[in-house]
Amino acid sequence: MGLTDGDTQQRMAADSAARLPLEDLRSFAKVFEQIRQGYIEEVDDRTLLEYAIKGMLQGLDPHSSYLDRRSFDDLQANTTGEFAGLGIEVGIENDHITVVTPMDDTPASRAGLRAGDMILRLSGKSMKGVSLDEAVEWMRGPKGSSVTLTIARKGHKQPFDVTLKRDTVRVRSVRSKILDKGYGYLRISQFQLDTGADVTEELIKLQKKGSLKGLVIDLRNNPGGVLQSSVEVADAFLEEGLVVYTEGRNEAANLSYSAEPGDLTEGAPLVVLINAGSASAAEIVAGALQDHRRAVVMGTDSFGKGSVQTVIPINNERAIKLTTALYFTPNGRSIQAQGITPDIVVERVKVTRLDDSPRPTEADLAGHLNNGNGGADRTFEDRSREQEGREDWMDRDNQIFEALNVLKGLNLYAHRDRDRGLRERLARADEQQ
């Protein structure tokens, strides 16, 4: 997404005025007047004109739209990751709005709200049967304003009230953790203005925990966001080369973005996870890393939104979101209506082990011989403890489990190639002597 300048819009308006079809404008005026005079309910002229603008944009494509004050505010909140609210991630459980988690350093966390708390009422309004979108809208509001939540909590016999004062909440689009020794996980939920900087910060955190042998970049269900941020994220893993380019009707829409020197992971193997919910900016990152053969892309086909929307403010409260270009991966692939095809297809499934029964090993047998190299015994219990982490991931998320296995394989063969190259260099040195 981007912004266009006012002068450009004025020139476009002047050019359009010279080409307006008068007969069609007369038809529009007649329809407008018929609605004003004959519709069953009176509708003011401003509202009718707003409906006309909405219809004009909705007729273009699924992603062009008119942004009224509320929609414009929501777009800005999604882009910046900041809004005034309580800082609660919520879901629906048993037809009740339920706290999934309170965000760190927010009014919700400071008030002691917990995961699993049910929100029964909000300032006296019952929340039973309320949709998730409605609940989120009600919890947001002007910074400094207060709201009282009636909470039902497991272990408490009676519901109790908690009063919170709304504050600025920043939603981080990036989080990370260690999957296994030397192997990291980077989750990017959407592309906000600060996502590129947040990726750098999370990579530094991972590297402080030890040298990275490989990294899983999770872009599943990432709807996209700011184009420039997707370029910054891809750039973090590339030494050089084209990341993405765009083509549109106007010269200003024809842009290209390239990586600057400096791979923050120093060439560590990468796996990018995508699915049908990965769209737009997420597809830019996956496509760039795939085209440069920098990452193995795993999962299922992505959504296929390969268009760029420009946000054009109309005034301080309203704007239009207009599709102005298509984007292309470094190899010239258009993702529009096709998507990114993963290098390795892995469906999200529930994995069931066929045999969980304990099996003794040689080390469990009485009177077994010691290891020939003096190594320690590895009993069934030892092996079970080693596999706990792996099996946990297999149960929770088989796609991450498979990505981790691929990373270990890539790292194993990379070591073999380096060892073989070292042996060949040493052999050549011996021959020269």
Image (spheres, helix red, strand yellow):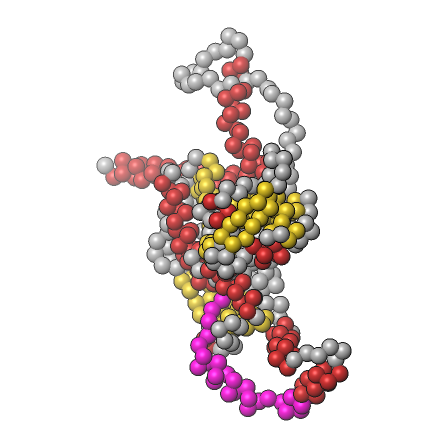
Q: Which residues are magenta?
A: 1-27
Q: Residue furthest left?
A: 433
Quadrant of residue 58 within the rendered picture? bottom right
What is the quadrant of the C terminus in the image? top left
Q: Position of residue 283 (x, y in %)?
A: 53, 58
At 53% from the left and 43% from the top, the residue drawn is 113
Question: Which one is nearer the viewer's eye here, 260 or 106?
Answer: 106
Tell me, yes or no, whether the highlighted magenta stretch contains residue 153: no
Examine the rendering and report whether any part of residue 423 can be seen: yes
Q: Position of residue 246 (x, y in %)?
A: 49, 68
Main secondary structure found in the magenta portion: helix
At 39% from the left and 51% from the top, the residue drawn is 200
Q: Position of residue 362 (x, y in %)?
A: 53, 16
Left or right relative to 169: residue 207: left
Quadrant of residue 278 within the rendered picture? bottom right
Q: How many marks on residues?
A: 0
Left or right relative to 386: residue 39: right
Residue 113, placed above or below residue 301:
above
At 48% from the left and 73% from the top, the residue drawn is 316
Examine the rendering and report whether any part of residue 323 can be seen: no
Residue 27, placed above or below residue 323:
below
Quadrant of residue 398 within the rendered picture? top right
Tell me, yes or no, whether the highlighted magenta stretch contains residue 15: yes
Q: Residue furthest top?
A: 367
At 66% from the left and 29% from the top, the residue drawn is 354
